Image (spheres, rainbow, N blue to C red):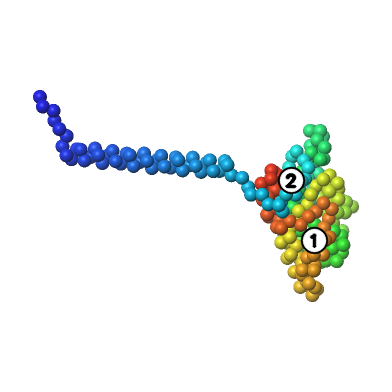
Amino acid sequence: MSKLSPSSSERRSFLTRLRTGLVSFGAMTGVAMAQSKAASAASSWEPARHEKDDWFDKVPGKHRLVFDTTTVDGLGDAFLFANNFFRANKTEYGLDNSDLAVVIIVRHRSTPMGYNDAMWAKYGKTFATRSKVEDPKTKLAPKVNIYNDASFGEDLRNRGNTLDSLAKLGVQFGVCAFATRAASRAIAEAGGGDADAIFKELTSNLVSNARMVPAGIVAVNRAQERGYSLVSA
C-alpha cells in the first residue's frame, strides 16, 4: 500500500503550531532570564558611601539601633526606649554600654530639643510654637530644654531620661539642618534678625553628643544602609 502524504494545509497548520510554540518558549525563556538578572542585580546591590555619613561607623557597638523622631512626644518615647535597650542588654545579655551603638535623629518638630538651655532661654517662644510644646509646670513656653531636666519626671514622656543621661550611656544625636534652617528663618522674621547668623548660633549650641546632619530624613536612610535597625517613635 502506498503511504498517504499530508496535505499542504496540514503541513502549514503543523508549521504554524511549531512556530507559535517556539515563540512562546522563547518568550518564557527571555522572561526567566530577565528575572534571573534582576534577582542577581538585587543581591549584589550595595549602597553608595559618603564621607558625611562616616560618623555612623565611628560609634562603637556590636548592635546598632537608630530612632527616627519627628515630634516632641515621639522623642520622649525614644528616650525611654533607648534607656530600656541599654538596661535589657546589660541585665539579660551581660553587654556593656560600649557594645551598643544608639543614634537618635531629631527632625521636624522634635528638632529644637537638640539645642541647649541657652537657646531655649533666648528663642523658647518660637521653638514652643513650632514644636507644639509647653512647660508642664507653668503651661507656658519652656525657658529651658525640658528634656534635659529630670525633675519633670512622669510629667513628660521621657520619664526622667534626659539628654545628658543618655549621652553618658553613649547615645548620639543627629539634629536636622533643614529644620534648623526653617527655625532660624522663623526667629529672624519674629525679631528682625539675620537668619544665617541665627543658624550658625543654633548649630554652635547643640546638646551633648549631638551633631548637625544635612537632613534628618537622609540620616535615617544612611543609618539603615550602615546596619542600624530602625525604630520610628
On the image, the x and y values in percent for residue 123 come to 83, 66
* Front position in the image: 200 or 155: 200
Mark 1 crowd level (few <14, some 14–19, many ≥20, 10 Å Cα): some
- Mark on residue 57? 2
Q: In the structure shown, which secondary structural element does the residue marked by tag 2 occupy?
A: helix
On the image, the x and y values in percent for residue 32 come to 44, 40
Given the current orientation, which residue lies at the most extreme front position?
51
Q: CA distance from mark 2 to mark 1?
A: 22 Å
On the image, the x and y values in percent for residue 156 come to 82, 53
Is residue 156 visible in the rendered structure shown here? no
Amino acid type at image mark 2: Asp
Q: In the structure shown, which secondary structural element does the residue marked by tag 1 occupy?
A: helix
Which residue is found at the position 18% from the left and 40% from the top?
Answer: 9
Which residue is found at the position 77% from the left and 43% from the top?
Answer: 101
Q: What is the tally of numbered marks visible in this picture?
A: 2
Which residue is found at the position 38% from the left and 42% from the top?
Answer: 27
- Which quadrant of the structure image shows residue 169? top right
Mark 2 crowd level (few <14, some 14–19, many ≥20, 10 Å Cα): some
Q: Which residue is mark 1?
A: 203
Location of the N terminus by quadrant is top left
Q: Please give left or right for residue 231 compared with residue 172 in the image.
A: left
